Image (cartoon, rainbow, N blue to C red):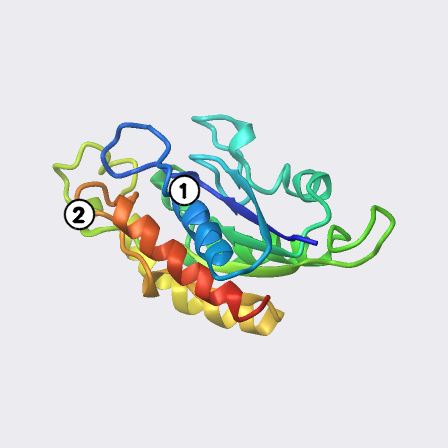
Amino acid sequence: MSIRILIYGDSNSWGYLDDGSGTRFEGRWPVSMAAQLLTDGHDIELIEECLPGRTTNMDDPQEGAHFNGATPLQAILLSQQPLDHVLIMLGTNDLKARFARSAADIVDAQISLARTAAALPCGPGGWANTATPAVTLICPPCLGIRADDPDWERAAEWLNGRATSTMVPNLLAAAAQKAGIGYINGNDHAASSALDPIHWTGDTHIGFGTAMAAYLAARL
C-alpha cells in the first residue's frame, strides 16, 4: 500500500516562483520530493494542499477569511484520510505588517496547527480507525534582504517582516521539541530569492525537494 504524504503550505509549496509570472512551477518542491522518493523505490502518494497567501490561523482582512490555514485544516485532513505523514510549512504570510505578529505569536500558531494534525484520527487504516499521522513542521526560510529595501514595491506590506522571520527558527525548534513534533529548519535547505524576498528560484525548489526526500526516506 502506498504511503500517503500530505503537504500543507502556502505559495512556496504551491510553486509560485520568484519571477512573478504566477505560473505554477512543475518542479515545485513537493513534486521534486515525491519524484526522488519514487526513484529511490518508495511507494508514496503525494497530496498537495497549498494555497498562496495562506496564513497559519488568521483571517486576512485584505484577501479574505478563506486564507486562514487553521479553519479548513481538520476537514482537509479527514477528507484525505488515510494519511501517513503530514508536512506543514506555514508562517511566511503571518509576517505581513498588517498582522502585527511577533515571532512568538507565529510559533504558537505553527505549533497549534501541528498539534491539531497530530491529534486527528486521519492516519493509516479505515474511517473508523483512531490512528494519527506523523507530523513534521517545516520552518519557512527567512525573508530575503530585499524585504528591507524601501525601494522594493512591496516593502510597506512586509515592513519589519525580515527581522521577525530571523527569530522564528530557534523559537520553533525549541517549541517543536517540547511538543514532540518533528521539525525541519527550512533555512538549512533553501533561501529566498534576491529578486523576490518572499519566493524561490526553480533550482531552490528542486534542491529543497531533494532534501525533504532524504528526511522522509529515513522515516519511511
- Could you classify mark 1 by the number of other residues whose Cα lies within 10 Å: few (under 14), some (14-19), or many (20 or more)? many
Q: Decide: is 169 above or below 5.
A: below
Q: Is label 1 in a helix, a strand or a loop?
A: helix
- Could you classify mark 2 by the number of other residues whose Cα lies within 10 Å: few (under 14), some (14-19), or many (20 or more)? some
Query: How far from the left and from the top, in percent, is residue 148?
Result: 19, 47
Look at label 1 and name its amino acid. Asn
Give the residue at x 50% y 26%: 64
Which circle marks residue 117 in the picture?
none
Q: Decide: is 11 above or below 191.
A: above
Residue 92 vs residue 120: left or right?
left
Cβ atoms under marks 2 and 1 closer than 8 Å: no
* Quarter of the view holding residue 80: top right
Q: Is label 2 in a helix, a strand or a loop?
A: loop
Q: Is residue 141 visible?
A: no
Query: How far from the left and from the top, in percent, is residue 138?
Result: 46, 58
Q: Which residue is mark 1?
A: 93
Mark earlier in primary sequence (2, 1): 1
Q: Quadrant of the N terminus?
A: bottom right
Residue sitting farthest toward the left: 151
Decide which of 147, 211 is in the foreground and name it: 211
Give the residue at x 62% y 71%: 180
Residue 218 vs residue 125: left or right?
left
Q: Which residue is mark 2?
A: 194
Residue 16 vs residue 61: left or right?
left
Look at label 2 and name its amino acid. Ala
Which of pointers 2 and 1 indicates the residue nearer the eye?
Answer: 2
Q: CA distance from mark 2 to mark 1?
A: 18 Å
Query: How far from the left and from the top, in percent, is residue 208?
Result: 36, 56
Q: Is residue 79 visible?
A: yes
Decide which of 204, 53 is in the foreground and name it: 204
Give the residue at x 14% y 44%: 149
